[in-house]
Amino acid sequence: MSSTGHSSSSLPAMIKRSLIATVIAFLLFLPTLGIKTSASGGVDGLFLTYRWMLLGVGCGLIFVGRMAYELFWAPKDGEQKSIKAPSSLARALGSSKVAKTVGPVLLVFAIAFPFLPFSDRYILDLGILIITYVMLGWGLQIVVGLAGLLDLGYVAFYAVGAYSYALLSIHFGFGFWMCLPLAGLLAATWGIVLGFPVLRLRGDYLAIVTLAFGEIIRVVLLNWRSFTGGSNGLSDIPRPSFFGIPFNQSEHGFAATFGLEYSSMQRIVFLYFLILALAVFTFFVTARLRRLPIGRAWEALREDEIACRSLGVNTVNTKLSAFAIGAMFGGFAGSFFAAKQAFVSPESFNFMESATILAIVVLGGMSSQLGVVFSAIVMVGGVELLRQLQFLKSVFGNDFDPSQLRLLLFGLAMVLMMLWRPRGLVSTRMPTVFLKDKKTVSAAMISQGRG
Amino acid sequence: MSQPLLSVNQLTMRFGGLTAVDAVSFDVYRNHITAVIGPNGAGKTTAFNCITGFYKPTSGDIVLIHKDDTEYKLQEMEDFRISQTAKVARTFQNIRLFGGMTVLENLMIAQHNRLMKASAFTIGGIFNTPTYQRAQEAAKKKALAWMDRVGITDRADDPAASLPYGAQRKLEIARAMCTDPVLLCLDEPAAGLNPKESEELNALLRSIRDHDDVGILLIEHDMSVVMEISDHIIVLDYGRKISDGTATEVRNDPAVIKAYLGVVEE
C-alpha cells in the first residue's frame, strides 16, 4: 500500500500502533500465557513455571496480525467509514415478503422434523430444547422488545410454571391440560407481583430488581424444603398422556391402543409436537397482540412514556399487562419443561437461563419473531454442535473438551454481533397498521426503551 | 361570554422555597384561543403542567366544565385520566412523538382508550370481532381525516422520526386532536418553525377553534402568532398574573411593557 503524506497511514505510524497493541497484548498474556501455576504435590502447594516461548509467540502473532490489518484492511485516511447496509440475509428477514415465506417453510420443516431419517432421540431432544427456547424468547420479547422493559429475571416465571405443574399434578393429580392454564395463570400473577414494585424503575435499576426477583424465586424454591423439596427437587412428576392414553407398554398404552409396536420414541415425538403446538400458539397470540391496541401501547411505552400518559394511556396497566402476558408464556413453557423432565429442581432455573433467553431476544432482534427463531437455533443448537466437534481432539490432544469453550465462543459471538449488528439479526420493525404500503421502520428510528 | 370551559382559581405551585406560580386565576372559553405569555421563567410551563396533571399544584383549583355541566377537578386527577376522562390534550415544547412508529400508528395510539374498549380489553381483539374491526376502521378514518387536515397524508406510513421538524409539530397537534379533546393545550407550538410554517400553524389553529368545538390554550414566545390569533391573552411575570385581556389591551398595558422592556428611570 502506498504511504501517503499523512502521518497516520505512514509506515512508522503503523509500526507504532502495532507496537502499542503488542505491549497491551504482552501485559494481558503475561499472567495468562507466560506464567503457569502447577501443584507441586508437596507441602509448598503451588509453584510457577514460566513459558517465555509461548508468550513470545503470542505477542509476535499480535504484532504480525496488527501490521497486516494496518497494511491491508484498515480504512485509509480520507476514506469515509461507511455505515454498512444490513447484510442481504438480515435485510431479507426484515422484509415482510420473505418473512411470509420463510415462516411457513420453517413450520413445515418443524412438523416433518421427527420423521426425517436422521432424527434420532438425541436430535429430537435437541429440537424440543430449541423450540422451548424459541417459545421463551417470544414470551420475553413482549417485555423486552415491545414494552422496552429490561427483564433479567425471566427464568423466575419459567420456574413458577414448572413448579406449578409439578405440585398440582403430584398433590391433586391434575392432568397436563388442566395444569397448563393454571401454570400460565400463576406465572402471570407473579408477573404482576413483580410488576408492581418496579413500575417506577427504569433502565439499570429495573434490570437489577428483576435480576434479584429471579434469584429470590430460586432461593425460595431451594429453601422451602417442605413444599418444594429443596435442592432435591420434585421427582416422579406424572408424564403427560395422549388425551388420557399413557405412553407405556401396558395394554392400555399408546402403542397397544393404536396397534403400533411399542417404542420409547413415541413419547418423545409426542412431546416434540406438544411443544411445537405450544410454540405455534405463542407465535400467533403474540403476533396478534402486537397488532392490537395493547401491543401498540406497549411499543408506545417503549418509545415515550410521558407522551403515552398525555394521550390518556394508562401506563400502569399497560406495563403490568406486558409483564403478566410475557410471564404467562414463560409459565406455559415451564409446565411443559416439568412434564418432559418428570423432575424439577432449582438448579434448572439459575441466572444463566435468564441470560440465555435474553441473549436470544437481543441477538434475534427486539421486535422480530423470526429473528428469535434463528438466534435460538444458533444459541442452543450451536452449543450442542460444540459437543459434536470431537475431531478437534485429534488436533489439540485428548484433554481438549470443545464444549468447555462454550462460554468463550458465546462471548465472542456477542462481541461480533455488537460490532456488526448491534440491534440484532432483524433490527427493523413492521408497522402494525398501514394506509397504503407497509414499509419497514429502520432500526435507527426505533427507541430501545429506557426501562 | 358564556360559562368558561376551564376555570383556574388561585393556582399556586411551589418548588421548595421557589414559588413558580403564585395565586394565578384565569378562565379559558370554548371556541377561543387563549394565550399565556411572559418572559422566561415567568411560570408559564409550570402552570401548564399543573393543568395537564404533570405537576400536582400546591394549592388552588383547576376546574374543567364539559358541555353537559360535568365538572372535573383537574388538580385531583392523575395525568392520564385528565386526558382520558376530562378530555384535555396537550403537546410538548420539545416534541414527543413515538419516533419509531409510523405517522398512522401515532394517531392510532391517541385513540387507544376507545380501541381498547372496542377490543373488549384485548380478548375480543384476539378473535377479531366485528365490533373491533369496525372500531379499527373508524379509528383509521379519523386518523386519515386529521392527516389530511394538517397535510401529512403522503407520509402516513413513514416513521414519525423521519418527518421534517414542521411536520412533526403538525403531527403532534393532530395526535392530540385524535383524543377528542375539549381543551387543547399547546406548549410553544411555533418554536422552531419558519415564517411560512408559522403561517400554516395559525391557519390550522384557527380552523380547529372554529370547527372542532374545543378551547385552545397555548404558551407562545412568537408574538406574530400570539398577537394574530389569540382571542384572549394572559401575561405572567415572576409567577404572577400581570395582565389579562385582548391583544390590543395587553399590548398597551404599562405593566406588560414594563415586564418586557423595563421602565425608564426618571
Image: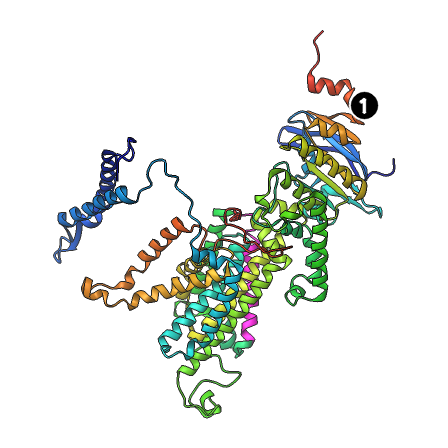
Residue name at image x 47 percent, y 58 percent: A92
User: In the picture provided, is A107 more to the left or to the right than B170?
Assistant: left
Of the 4 image quadrants, the one containing the N terminus of chain B is top right
Q: Is residue A187 magenta?
A: yes
As displayed, is residue A329 above or below residue B167?
Answer: below
Chain letter, disc 1 residue = B
Q: Nearer the viewer, residue A329 or A402?
A: A402
Q: Nearer the viewer, residue A156 or A202?
A: A202
Q: Name, please, the residue furthest toward the front.
A: A2
User: In the picture provided, is B210 more to the left or to the right than A425?
Assistant: right
Magenta stretch: helix, strand or loop mostly: helix
As displayed, is residue A269 above or below residue B60?
Answer: below
The x, y position of residue A143, in whole percent, is 53, 56
The x, y position of residue B233, in whole percent, is 77, 29
**Residue occupied by mark 1:** B249
The x, y position of residue B20, in whole percent, is 66, 29
As displayed, is residue A418 above or below residue B256?
Answer: below
Residue name at image x 17 percent, y 51 percent: A36
Examine the image and state in which quarter residue A183 appears: bottom right
Q: Is residue A218 magenta?
A: no
Residue name at image x 36 percent, y 77 percent: A118
As displayed, is residue B107 above or below residue B186?
Answer: below
Q: Nearer the viewer, residue A158 or A140?
A: A140
Please state the extent of the stretch shown in magenta in the rendering.
A178-201
Examine the image and state in which quarter residue A228 appears: bottom left
Query: Is residue A213 among what the camera can see?
Result: yes
The x, y position of residue A400, in whole percent, is 22, 63
| Residue type, numbered disc 1 | Glu
